[in-house]
C-alpha cells in the first residue's frame, strides 16, 4: 500500500490465484475504494458457471486487461512517470492515470531470460521497485536485481557475481546457476547518491 500526501490518494495491491490480481485506489483517504482488476482468477471461472452466486454476490463479468496471467500485485511505487506495480509472476506495470488503467513494461517482459528464472519461496515475484525518472532498480526473487538507466526502456541484470565460485556446486534445485540466475533478492534500499544496497 502506498499513498500520495499531496492529494490524499491511496493505492493497495493484492490478489491470489482465486481472485486474480488488482490494484485498489481511494481518492478520499480510504473511505471509498475502486478496483482496477488486472487479471482473472479461479473465482471468475467458477462464477461464470454459477448464476446463483453471481446474482447474490454482485460479481460482474469482464475481460481484465492481462487475462489470467497474473496472480497478485506485490509492490507499488509512485514516480514522476506514474504509478508502478510489481507483480507475481515477475512483471512490471505502469499506470499513467492514477491507477485506473495499466500497461505492461515491454522491455522487462521481453528480457532474454525470463523463462529460465527460478521462483523464490513465495514464487517468481517482483517485490521491490526503487528510483524515479530514468534510473530504476527492481528486485525479483529469485532472478536477482535489475537496473534501467533509460526509464524502463531497457534493463540490465545487476547481480553480484563475486561469490559465484562458492556456489558452483549447488545442492538445492533453486540455487544460483552459472553465478547469475537464482539470486533471491530479499530487500533493496536506496542508500543516497547512486548507491543501491542489496
Image (spheres, grey):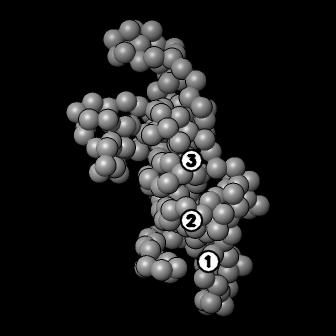
* Separation of residues labelled 3 and 1 (CA atoms): 22 Å
Binning the other alpha carbons within 10 Å of mark 1 as few (below 14), some (14 to 19) or many (20 upward) gives many
Residue appearing at x 27%, y 30% in the figure: 32
Q: Position of residue 51 (x, y in %)?
A: 45, 9
Q: Which mark is residue 112?
A: none
- Going from the N terminus, do you reach mark 1 or mark 2 first? 2
Q: Which mark is residue 93?
A: 3
Is 117 placed above or below 194 here? above
44 to the left or right of 116: left
Outermost residue to the front: 6
Tell me if residue 194 can be seen: yes
- Going from the N terminus, do you reach mark 3 or mark 1 first? 3
- Residue carrying label 2: 136
Number of numbered discs present? 3
Q: Position of residue 48 (x, y in %)?
A: 52, 16
Is 124 placed above or below 55 here? below
Q: Position of residue 141 (x, y in %)?
A: 54, 64
- Residue carrying label 1: 159
- Badge 2 marks a residue whose secondary structure is strand
Is 52 placed above or below 135 here? above
Residue appearing at x 41%, y 18% in the figure: 59
Q: Position of residue 43 (x, y in %)?
A: 46, 27
* Separation of residues labelled 1 and 2 (CA atoms): 15 Å
- Badge 1 marks a residue whose secondary structure is loop
Residue appearing at x 28%, y 44% in the figure: 8
* Separation of residues labelled 2 and 3 (CA atoms): 13 Å
Amino acid at each position: 500500500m502506498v499513498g500520495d500526501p499531496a492529494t490524499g490518494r491511496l493505492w493497495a495491491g493484492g490478489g491470489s490465484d482465486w481472485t486474480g490480481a488488482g490494484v485498489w485506489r481511494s481518492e478520499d483517504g480510504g473511505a471509498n475504494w475502486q478496483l482496477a482488476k488486472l487479471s482473472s482468477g479461479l473465482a471468475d471461472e467458477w462464477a461464470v458457471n454459477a448464476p446463483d452466486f453471481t446474482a447474490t454476490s454482485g460479481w460482474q463479468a469482464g475481460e481484465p486487461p492481462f487475462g489470467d496471467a497474473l496472480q497478485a500485485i506485490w509492490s507499488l511505487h509512485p514516480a514522476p512517470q506514474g504509478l508502478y506495480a510489481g507483480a507475481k509472476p515477475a512483471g512490471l506495470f505502469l499506470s499513467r492515470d492514477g491507477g485506473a488503467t495499466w500497461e505492461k513494461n515491454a522491455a522487462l517482459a521481453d528480457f532474454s531470460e525470463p523463462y529460465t528464472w527460478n521462483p523464490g519461496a513465495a514464487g517468481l515475484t517482483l517485490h521491490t521497485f526503487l528510483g524515479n525518472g530514468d534510473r530504476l532498480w527492481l528486485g525479483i526473487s529469485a532472478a536477482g536485481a535489475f537496473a534501467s538507466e533509460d526509464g524502463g526502456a531497457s534493463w540490465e541484470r545487476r547481480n553480484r557475481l563475486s561469490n559465484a565460485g562458492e556456489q558452483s556446486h549447488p545442492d538445492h534445485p533453486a540455487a544460483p546457476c552459472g553465478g547469475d540466475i537464482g539470486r533471491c533478492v530479499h530487500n533493496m534500499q536506496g542508500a543516497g547518491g547512486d548507491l543501491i544496497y542489496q
